[in-house]
Every structure is written in structure tokens, then in C-alpha cells.
Amino acid sequence: MEEMKVDPRIIRTRKLLMDAFIKIAQKKEFKDITIKDITEEATVNRATFYSHFQDKYDVMDASITEDILESIVKHLNHYDRLNEETIVKIFFTLTKFHTKKRTEYSSQCRRSMESFYSIIEQKIKKELGELFYSLFLKQQLNLDLEALKIGTTVLSWGIYGASVDWENNSSLSAEQYIKKALPFIVTEINNFKG
């Protein structure tokens, strides 16, 4: 079966619209952003916008998923075992995201960006949950599916929560923080194996 190739112009225009949306979102509240704002910033017409996106919610979701999340998820999808090394690397990936978020958006409209962070947080937790679930299955833990789902939720929310706590409340370096947190996380993972 032959793979369909996407015209590079389509990819560029879609990226142009998403970049325009992110740029505007850094200045305006989401509720105040219009399609006209996006098309003017991207220098395209409304028809072009609607050939790529349904509405501003669609472009917001695509911007978060394709632009922000892809950079995180690509670092998560190459692990084959759930162990201390994997946990540390995942934590560092999350702390790099938080550091980038803080430096890139510190001077921009903070309230507007905060609404995106809650969406990003939910998507990251979902991706982490799927990653941990697949790693638990690879390690062939003798747990029922409901226990695996609960375990992946606890682990994904816990690691994401630790990265947020590090960003907001800790004076420790990321390395120092994860070193102190790791015994608690490993204990929980070992409870699943036992």
C-alpha cells in the first residue's frame, strides 16, 4: 500500500496558522481571539483558515498537540522498561518543558496562557498514562487491567505533579529533587510488581 504524501504547502500553511494563533494567544485572552486576528497575523484569508481548521478551538487544540506536546512526547516514546532511569529521564523531560514555558511566556499575557496550561497538563498526563500502561504490559505484570489503569493514573499524575511542584515550590535543582522523590516512586512501581 502506497503512503499518501502531504503537499508541503499544506503543512507550511497549517504551521503558519498555528504559529499565528500562539503569537496572538500570548497577547490576548482566548475568548477575545477571533478568526480575523489569526488570518491577519498569518496573512491568509478566511477560506484558507477554514480549509485547515473548523474554528479557534480546533486551531488551539492542534497548536497544543502538534507544537507543544510533540516536543515532549517524542522524548517519551523510546523507553522499553519502567525503571529508575526511565523515571528520571521522564522527570527531566517534564522539567525542561516547565523551564521553557516559564522563560518563553514570562513577559506575555499570563492569564491567557494559563488556560492553555491546563489543557496541556491533561494531554501530558494522558500521554504519560499511555506510556506507563504500555511499559507495564511489556513487563508482563500479573495485574488485572483495572489495577494497571489505576497504577498508570497514579504514576503519571504523580510524576507530572512532582515536576509542577519542582517548578513552583522547590529551590532544589531538578537532579536533587528527583533524587529525593525517586524512592517514593520506585516503591510504588515495586508494589505493582510484587
Image (spheres, grey):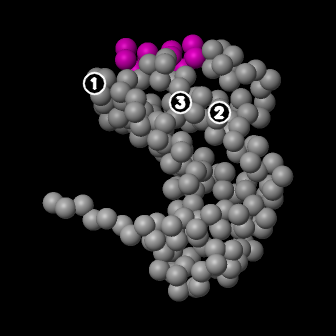
Dot 1 falls on a residue whose secondary structure is loop
Residue 190 belongs to the span the image colors magenta: yes
Quadrant assignment, res 167 = top right
Residue visible at 60% across and 35% down in the picture = 94
Q: Nearer the viewer, mark 2 or mark 1?
A: 2
C-alpha distance separating marks 3 and 1? 21 Å
Which label was assigned to residue 140? 1
Q: Nearer the viewer, residue 134 or 19?
A: 19
| Quadrant (top left, top right, bottom left, bottom right) of the N terminus | bottom left
Which label was assigned to residue 95? 2
Bounds of the magenta span? 182-194
Residue visible at 46% across and 41% down in the picture = 74
Q: Nearer the viewer, mark 3 or mark 1?
A: 3
Q: Earlier in the sequence, mark 2 or mark 3?
A: 3
| Quadrant (top left, top right, bottom left, bottom right) of the C terminus | top left
Provide residue 112's location: percent of width, then percent of height: 75, 60
From the viewer's perspective, is 124 left or right of 36? Answer: left
Quadrant assignment, res 92 = top right
- Asked if residue 193 can be seen in this view, the reply is yes
Relative to 126, say whether 45 is above or below: below
Q: Earlier in the sequence, mark 2 or mark 1?
A: 2
Residue 55 belongs to the span the image colors magenta: no
Relative to 34, say whether 118 is above or below: above
From the viewer's perspective, is 108 left or right of 142? Answer: right
Q: Which residue is mark 3?
A: 90
Dot 3 falls on a residue whose secondary structure is helix
What is the total number of numbered labels drawn onto the structure image?
A: 3
C-alpha distance separating marks 2 and 1? 29 Å
Residues at marks 3 and 1 touching, judged by CB atoms closer than 8 Å: no
